[in-house]
Amino acid sequence: MNLQGKKVTLHDMSLRDGMHPQRHQLTPEQMIEVATALDEAGVPLIEVTHGDGLGGASVNYGFPAASDEAYLRAVVPKMTRAKISALLIPGIGTVDHLRMAHDCGVETIRVATHCTEADVSEQHIGLGAKMEMDTVGFLMMAHMIGPEELLEQAKLMQGYGANCLYITDSAGFMLPDDVTARVSLFREKLDADVEVGFHGHHNMHMGIANSLAAIEAGAARIDGSVAGMGAGAGNTPLESFVAVLHRMGVDTGVDMWKLMDIAEEIVYPLMTHKVRVDRDSLTLGYAGVYSSFLLHAKRAAEKYGLKSTDILVELGRMKTVGGQEDMIEDVALDMKKAGTAE
Amino acid sequence: MTTKVKAAIIGSGNIGTDLLYKALRSEIIEPVWMVGIDPQSEGLRRAKALGLKTTAEGVKGMEPHIAEDKVQIAWDATSAYVHESNNALVKKHGVRMVDLTPAAIGPFCVPPVNLREMVGRSEQNVNMVTCGGQATIPMVAAVSRVQPVEYGEIIATVSSKSAGPGTRKNIDEFTRTTARGVEVVGGAKRGKAIIIINPAEPPLIMRDTIHCLTERAPRQEEIIESARQMIAEVQKYVPGYTLKNGPVFDGNRVSFYMEVEGLGDFLPKYAGNLDIMTAAGLRTAELIAEEIQRAEAA
């Protein structure tokens, strides 16, 4: 694979996707510490919000240690070069949250929908574009449909005003060929000035391999997470990814050594859950299940005396989508009933 | 014998058509007009075949006939964007409006919770909140009538096929309006609503999760009994309203896992979200019709 001379924008997820393993309990102070260090290391874009995006504070997903607004107001003013992004999932967050984030100085808004439901994002992408934000369409669980079908959804978001379209492997299910097929089709068929991005999960250990495939196929933005801190087995571990890219002659503008220090000295010590490829996260990837279900399934398994992998496999069989965390206790109760009946 | 109260359906889409089938069975209401905006609309064609007058010119097309056709009740099954102008046109003629859009210019109505008090006030316009609201607010109310609810949260999951263009174009209206309904009608001090659209095939039956955080430890026995009664009330007009699991009591959290299967009049059974809306809309209109009849008899 020859990526010599390619340019890529790296986007850190540790303070958004990383909220999932932390049960949304990162404090604004911890966020400042990580974000300022990432800024210093030259990471150009950092996402900050509740794990489920703006407005995610809930019984269903978990109440965070602070409000989205408190996190953003804490972090944004501390940045010297890095820009802050926020995630918004229509159906959970609204344009009111988007306006608030914009007011806090967020420059990139990423509007996320399930891969087949792009048309719920018109209001939000439209407003982001109107406010001249860097507006990204984020198609989640992108493994569930084929490249052509995914492209149709991306075109809708492009039509609403998105200037960047993401293929989001929320379940960490994809293999490099799946990524190549989708990214190259996007690159070929979307407008030339629209960027293509890839967001991976490391559930099958494929985060780095998939992200490399994405760059080769024309992706200009790649999501990763320092120390891999993200849902499931985490996101593409950013420091390892940068090391690989530098060996391959890709220009990232990021200081690899500083990134390693952040992982080692700041992020690993603050982790309350060991983010790694274990039995449950591997099951997520193998069965194609939304990564943030992980801890919810572990809790339900413990409470109802079930095996968490069984719950996750059942959620995959039911073709659940992102956001359906409420199904986990429901499924566990069904399984318990069925078990008692036997 | 009293004559049926005449009614108009504004909106010839799926909701309007399902409502038409239900209204044709009513013993007290007679649907006489179906209003659309597309001459090619299947819904208008179907309504015409069933003997209704139709127009593809919007409410303006029906307006000159409101008085002579004695239309006294209208349902608006269009979208929040046009509801206000639709309402203004029929209001001039004294027509009572049951609003099925999330426009919410009138007070919220969730039949098993507040229909009686709503009708007694002779409101010109009542709003049916949202499909998710109809499916969940009764359960929030079932808890809040036992003891104070600090926070009510609902998660409505609907199949992709049952989420129409109106809902999709303005999904924020859904979350905002439903959350407000959870507070105003459900009785929770703070409300939150989440909607998930799932494209699985075959389409999933509407699912709803209701979480209440009570101020003090939940009074379990009373909540279980209150919920049982409330579910029975809803089942009077939506027989497929079922508690799948729960209530789960976990500290101050009280959770219900519901499934809503529709009657399958015009809409498929999985679209319980749409069915509960049309059924609640008809139920509300019937109570208004009774009130109109009483006033005319007096």
Image: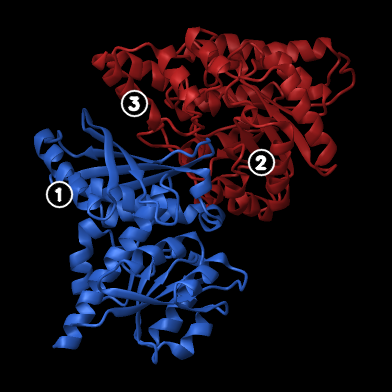
Chain colours: A red, B blue
Q: Which of A78 and B250 is in front in this view?
A: B250
Q: Label 3: chain?
A: A
N-terminal-most mark, 3 or 2: 2
Q: Which of B259 and B173 is in front in this view?
A: B259
Q: In the structure shown, which secondary structural element does the residue marked by tag 2 occupy?
A: strand
Residue B254, image x, y percentages: 23, 35
Q: Do labels 1 and 3 share a chain?
A: no
Q: Label 1: chain?
A: B
Mark 2 closeness class: few <14, some 14–19, many ≥20 residues within 10 Å: many
Q: Mark 3 points at which residue?
A: A329
Q: Label 2: chain?
A: A
Q: Do labels 1 and 2 share a chain?
A: no
| Alpha carbon distance from label 3 to label 2 | 30 Å
Residue type pointed to by label 1: Arg
Residue B186, image x, y percentages: 25, 52
Quadrant of res B282: bottom left
Residue A111, image x, y percentages: 60, 42
Task: Tell me if residue A65 can be seen.
Answer: no
Number of on-image labels: 3
| Alpha carbon distance from label 1 to label 2 | 43 Å
Q: Mark 1 points at which residue?
A: B145
Residue B284's tag is none
User: Are dots 1 and 2 in contact, CB under 8 Å?
Assistant: no
Mark 3 closeness class: few <14, some 14–19, many ≥20 residues within 10 Å: many
Q: Name the residue under label 2.
A: A137
Q: Residue at x 83, y 43 (%)?
A: A193
Q: Which residue is drawn at 31% across and 60% down?
A: B280
Q: In the structure shown, which secondary structural element does the residue marked by tag 1 occupy?
A: loop
In the rendered image, the vertical position of residue B250 relative to residue A97, given as above or below: above
